[in-house]
Image: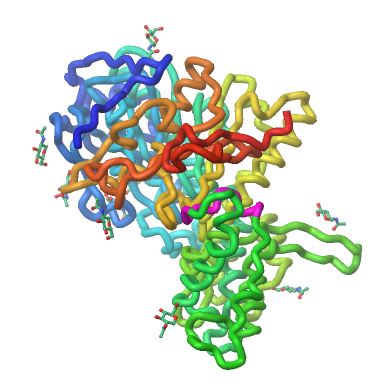
Amino acid sequence: MMFTYRLLGLALTLVTSVHASSHCSVEDLSNFISQNDNAEVLMAQSISSNGSFGEVGNVAYPKNATYLPSLCVATINVTSSPTSSYTFGVFLPDDWNQRFLAVGNGGFSGGINWYAMGTGVKYGFATISTSTGHNSTGQDMSWAIGNPETKADWAGRSLHGSTVLAKQIVEQYYGSAANKSYYSGCSTGGRQGVKSAQDHPEDFDGILAGAPAWMSTSQQLWQLKVGAINLPVDGPGYLPTALFSVISQEVLRQCDKSDGISDGIIMNPKHCNFRPEKLLCAPTPANQSACLTAPQISTLKQMYLPLIQFDADVNNLTYLYPNFGLGSELQMPASFGTNNEPSLYGTDYAKNYIFDDPDWDWRISFNYSTFVEAGRLNPGNVNADNFDLSGFHSRGGKLITYHGYADGLIPTDVSQVLYDETYMAMAQQGVNLDEFYRLFFVPGMQHCQGSVYDAPWYFGASDHASNLETNGQHKFPVPGVDDAKHDALLALVAWVEGGQEVDQLVATKYENDTVSNGVLRQRPICKYPGFASWDGEGDVNVASSWSCVGYDS
Ligand SMILES: *[C@@H]1O[C@H](CO)[C@@H](O)[C@H](O)[C@H]1NC(C)=O
Ligand SMILES: *[C@@H]1O[C@H](CO)[C@@H](O)[C@H](O)[C@H]1NC(C)=O
Ligand SMILES: *[C@@H]1O[C@H](CO)[C@@H](O)[C@H](O)[C@H]1NC(C)=O
Ligand SMILES: *[C@@H]1O[C@H](CO)[C@@H](O)[C@H](O)[C@H]1NC(C)=O
Ligand SMILES: *[C@@H]1O[C@H](CO)[C@@H](O)[C@H](O)[C@H]1NC(C)=O
Ligand SMILES: *[C@@H]1O[C@H](CO)[C@@H](O)[C@H](O)[C@H]1NC(C)=O
Ligand SMILES: *[C@@H]1O[C@H](CO)[C@@H](O)[C@H](O)[C@H]1NC(C)=O
Ligand SMILES: *[C@@H]1O[C@H](CO)[C@@H](O)[C@H](O)[C@H]1NC(C)=O
Ligand SMILES: *[C@@H]1O[C@H](CO)[C@@H](O)[C@H](O)[C@H]1NC(C)=O
C-alpha cells in the first residue's frame, strides 16, 4: 500500500527555503555565539540527504536519527556554573521551514535526544535537544547526589539556556530569525514544556506537552508509595506482575461497554463503576491464578485511591497526589520495583535527588510528611507548579497537553489537576484558559506512547514516530495522514500561526503498528472536559462516526 505524505494542513503551508550550508563549520558557528563566553562549539558537520547521525556512548539516547534531510549538525557545550555544564545538539536543515523546535528528554536520562531531533527536522524545523547536563539512563540518578547545579540544569536551566543560544545560531546561520518557536516532549519532556511556559514564556510560541511529570517531587514519591503498598513480596496482599493481565481483563469486561461499544477501548474510565470484588477467588477456585484473595483485592483498591493526608492537629485533609486510572493495569507493574523494593524512580530519587543521603531508608523515614518536605526542598526548582501562565498567554503562546488514560507510570489525573489549577489561576485574572491551553485525554494510550487492545494513539506527539520505523528507516510521524487534523504538532502550528483552534485531533492505529499494513482504526480525541461519543450507526473504526461531546456550553 502506498501513502502520499500530505505535508500541508488545510490552511497551513509549511514553506521551506533552501539555504546553502556554507556556514556549517566550528569556526562559523563559534563566531555566531562569540559573545557568550560560557559556550563552545564542539563539533559541526554536514549530513547529506538520507544520512544518519548519532553518538557512540550516548547511554540515554543510543538510537541514531536516520533518513535525514540534508542538514548541518552541531554540538555546543555550555558551562552553567563553576561545577556544571550541559551540551545541546542542533540540526539545521537546508530546506528550512523558518521555524524552531526543541524536543524534550525522558525520565532522569541525560544526553542529547538525536532520534527525536531526527523526527522534528523532517518537518523542516531547525531542531535542538539538550543533554540536560549529565550522562545517564532513565532510572540512574547517581549523578544528582551532592550536585545542586547539575540538578538545576536537569530541572530547567539547560532547556532554557540551550534554547536562547540555539536561536542565536539559527538567526545567524540562515540570516533571519525563526518566525515561530515550538516545543514537543512527554513525561519529563512534558514537565520541561510546562515549566517553560511558566518560567520562560518568551522561549516558545507553541508547546506540546505529554503526560507531564509537573509535580516531580510528588510523582516520584507516589511511585515509592504505590510500590511500598504492594510489598512485601511474601505478604498476603502482594500482587505479582502476572496478575495484572487478569485484573486488566476484568476491568475491560466491566468497563468496555460503558461507552456503548465492545471494542477493547474504554473511552472514559470515569464512566465506569469498577468493582474489584468481582475478582475475589471462590472458596475452591477453578483457577487460582485467575482470581484475587481478599488481601490482594485490598491492595488493588489502594492503587485506585488518591493520596490524601489527614492532619489531626488542625483537622484538615490535603490532596497530595492522584491515583492510577482504570485501564492502566497492564502498565502498573512498571511503577513497581524489584528485589522487594519499590521502584528506583522513588527510592533513588529520594536518596540522590531530594535528600542527598545514600543511607536514606524508605522503611524508616518515608511517610506523608516526606511529600511536604520534598516539595519544600524542591531541588533545582524542579516542580512546574507556578500556575499563573499570564506571561505565556499575553505573548500569544499556545499550550496543548495530552495524557493516555492507560498510563501506568504517571497518573492520568495529574494533567487534569494541572489544567484545573491553571484554570483557577487564569480565571482569577479574567482569562478563559480555553483561549490558549487545551488538554486531550487519549483512551487506551499508555505512558506517552503505545496502547492496550489496539486503541488508536498515533497523533504526531513525542516519540510517536519511533514505533513505526522499518529497517532502521525513521518515519514521518503519522504516515499517510500527516496534516493538522491528525498530527498534534502541525495542529499546534496551525493554531499559533493561523488561529485554527484545536478542538479535536484524530488518533490513528496501524494494523500491528506496521504502516504498510494500513490503518486499522481512527478515532477523535477531544479537548477536556469532552469525550468522543459514537453516533450509534457508523463504522466504529472510522473517525467520522464519532463526535466530541460533554461540554457544558
Ligand atoms: C536511504 O538509505 C538507506 C540505507 O540507510 C537505503 O536503504 C535507502 O535506499 C536510501 N533511500 C534513498 C531514497 O536513497
Ligand atoms: C550512529 O551514528 C554515529 C555517528 O553519526 C556512528 O558513529 C555510529 O556508528 C552510528 N551507530 C549505528 C548503530 O549506526
Ligand atoms: C557524556 O557523553 C558524551 C557523548 O554522548 C561525551 O561526549 C561526554 O564526554 C560524556 N560526559 C561525561 C562526563 O561522561
Ligand atoms: C564542557 O565544559 C566543561 C567546562 O566548563 C567541561 O568540564 C566539560 O568536559 C565540557 N564537556 C564536553 C563534552 O566537552
Ligand atoms: C517568516 O517571516 C518572513 C518575513 O516576515 C516571511 O517572508 C515568511 O513567509 C515567514 N515564513 C513563514 C513560514 O511564515
Ligand atoms: C489460569 O489463569 C491464568 C491467568 O489468566 C491463565 O494464564 C491460565 O492459562 C489459566 N489456567 C487454566 C488451567 O485455565
Ligand atoms: C489544609 O489543606 C489544604 C489542601 O487541602 C492545604 O492547602 C492547607 O494548607 C491545609 N491547612 C492546614 C492548616 O494544614
Ligand atoms: C515522618 O518521618 C519523619 C522522618 O523522616 C519524622 O521526623 C516524622 O515524625 C514522621 N512523621 C510521622 C507523622 O510519623
Ligand atoms: C497482525 O497480527 C496478528 C496477530 O499476530 C495476525 O493474526 C494478523 O494476521 C496480523 N495482520 C497483518 C495484516 O499482518
Residue 379: percent from left, percent from top: 59, 54
- In the foreground, 546 or 127: 546
Q: Which picture quadrant has residue 181?
A: top left
Q: Is residue 267 magenta?
A: yes
Residue 293 sits inside the magenta stretch? no
Q: Quadrant of the N terminus?
A: top left
* Residue 151 in view (yes/no): no
Q: Residue furthest bottom?
A: 284
Instruction: State the residue in front, 282 or 268.
Output: 282
Q: Position of residue 176 (x, y in %)?
A: 35, 13
Q: Which residues are magenta?
A: 263-271
Residue lying farthest front?
A: 537
Assign the C terminus to one quadrant of the image: top right
Q: How is the image coloured?
A: rainbow
Residue 387 at x, y = what percent? 68, 38
461 shown above or below 94: below
Q: Is residue 448 above or below residue 492?
A: below
Above or below, comparing residue 15 to residue 215 in the picture: above
What residue do we see at 60% from left, 70% from top? 226
Residue 254 or 424: which is nearer the viewer? 254
Residue in front for this viewpoint, 12 or 313? 12
Q: Give the total number of marks visible in the rendering.
A: 0
On the picture, is 47 further left or further right than 443? Answer: left
Relative side of 344 to 198, left or right: left
Residue 473 sits in which quadrant? top left
Q: Residue at x 24, y 20 (%)?
A: 95
At a point 33% along the width and 33% down the height, the residue shown is 120
Res 515 seen here: yes
Magenta span: predominant SS is loop
Where in the figure is residue 548, as x and y percent of width and height?
58, 34
